[in-house]
Amino acid sequence: MGCFRRPEITAIGRKFSPKKECVAIGETGLDRIQGPDLAVQEWIFRKHIELSETYQLPLIVHCVRSWNELKMIRRELNPTQYWVYHGISKANLINEILQEGFILSIGANVLTNEKLQLAIKGIPFDQLLLETDDSLVPIQNIYHKIAELKGIPVIALQEKIARTFERIFSKWNNG
């Protein structure tokens, strides 16, 4: 266990014991479009934050139309573990999300979202990860697009992303 596909699917109530293979908690968070009542989602999300802090694992965060609530929870709890904002697509929120200390994970939407493309230059490499999530787009396409937008060779981007990944998911290599 280590990846919850939706905020409402959880092992809360059962004893959680992370196995060696568990490198993060999530995907978890708040979603105003899908899932149960926001109060239920928030309760579960807080439990996942507790697991993240207790087991010193990064948290993979899902957020749909609930940025203000998410930001307030983060400020209230002041977590010590990394929070990775999964699948960011709202370019207008990027600066605020970065200022709150999140790591941004960019997926296939960067290939078509012009506003997101314009915002890519302002994302520091130490707060950037790339993903495919449930997209059929090869990760290489995302690397090529980000490298083009950042004006660097793909190999340089791969090295920078690898360093960020190793820092955030330190248990990946350490077991």
Image (cartoon, rainbow, N blue to C red):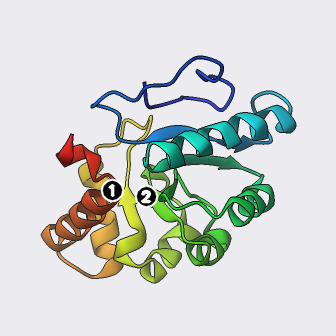
Horizontal placement of 168 versus 8: left or right?
Answer: left
Residue 69 at x, y percent in the picture? 80, 56
Of the pair 78 and 111, the residue shown nearer to us: 78
Q: Residue at x 33, y 79 (%)?
A: 150
Q: Amino acid at mark 2?
A: Leu
Residue 111 marker:
2
Which quadrant holds the C terminus?
Answer: top left
Residue 66 at x, y percent in the picture? 77, 53
Mark 1 or mark 2: which is in front? 1
Of the pair 81 and 94, the residue shown nearer to us: 81
Q: SS class of the residue under badge 2?
A: helix
Of the pair 162 and 87, the residue shown nearer to us: 162
Q: Is 145 rendered above or below residue 1?
A: below
Residue 82 marker:
none
Q: How far is disc 1 from disc 2 in space, using C-alphas?
A: 7 Å
Kindly check if marks 1 and 2 are in contact, taking CB atoms under 8 A apart as contact: yes
Residue 91 at x, y percent in the picture? 61, 69
Residue ranking furthest to the top: 14
Residue 101 at x, y percent in the picture? 55, 71
Which quadrant holds the N terminus?
Answer: top left
Q: Residue at x 42, y 38 (%)?
A: 135
Q: Residues within 10 Å of mark 1 (few under 14, many from 20)?
A: many
Figure disc tally: 2
Q: Which residue is mark 1?
A: 142
Q: Is 63 rendered above or below residue 99?
A: above
Q: Amino acid at mark 1?
A: Ile
Q: Residues within 10 Å of mark 2 (few under 14, many from 20)?
A: some
Horizontal placement of 168 versus 73: left or right?
Answer: left
